[in-house]
Amino acid sequence: QLQLVESGGGSVQAGGSLRLSCVGSKYTYEGNCMAWFRQDPGKEREGVAVMYDGGGWSYYGDSVKGRFTMSLDDAKNTLYLEMNNLKPEDTAMYYCAAGGLRFGGGDYCYTSPDKFNYWGQGAQVTVSS
């Protein structure tokens, strides 16, 4: 059973930074779609960042563009989400995901959470004003 283990959540003041990590097994991310989602209680899971390891394509939600950066360290089988200039509205539980479906079999990924098969346990990010 493929496991994704997250770390790096915490509490910061507005304007601060955090980095989330998501460690997978060997080949977890190779040639696959991977993503970060976030969810507030009572709300739907929202796509934050999605990327495909093979074609250079990536997607960022409008609310995080220019502030969040997703990256992959193949050697460490680790997915990262660098979050800068954090805002109180970024407060949520953040989940990493892997094994996502490619759109039309090309170099693009679906950005909906129901298209991803493997999930991390979640990391709480709290931003105070």
Image (cartoon, rainbow, N blue to C red):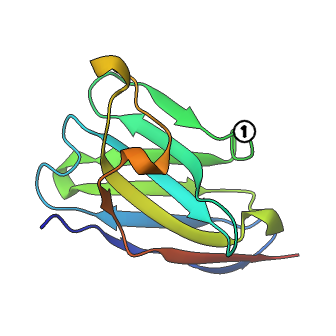
Decide if residue 25 is on the left or right side of residue 12: left
In this view, which residue lies farthest toward the right? 129
Toward which corner of the image does residue 80 lie, by quadrant? bottom left
The residue lying toward the viewer, choosing from 24 and 120, is: 120
Asked if 112 appears above or below 124 in the picture, the reply is above
Q: Residue at x 58, y 49 (%)?
A: 48
x, y (%) of residue 8? 48, 75
Q: Is residue 106 visible?
A: no
Q: Residue at x 57, y 48 (%)?
A: 47
x, y (%) of residue 111? 50, 39
Decide if residue 10 is on the left or right side of residue 31: right
Toward which corner of the image does residue 31 lie, by quadrant? top left
Toward which corner of the image does residue 44 lie, by quadrant? bottom right
Decide if residue 116 is on the left or right side of residue 58: left
User: For mark 1, does the 10 Å Cα neighbourhood hold few (<14), some (14 to 19), or many (20 or more) residues?
Assistant: few
x, y (%) of residue 20? 48, 66
- Tell me the kind of residue under disc 1: Asp
Q: Residue at x 80, y 64 (%)?
A: 89
Which residue is label 1 attached to? 62
Decide if residue 34 is on the left or right side of residue 99: right
Secondary structure type for disc 1: loop
The residue lying toward the viewer, choosing from 63 and 73, is: 63
Name the quadrant of the C terminus: bottom right
Q: Residue at x 38, y 44 (%)?
A: 115
Name the quadrant of the N terminus: bottom left
Q: Is residue 30 visible?
A: yes
x, y (%) of residue 17? 65, 65
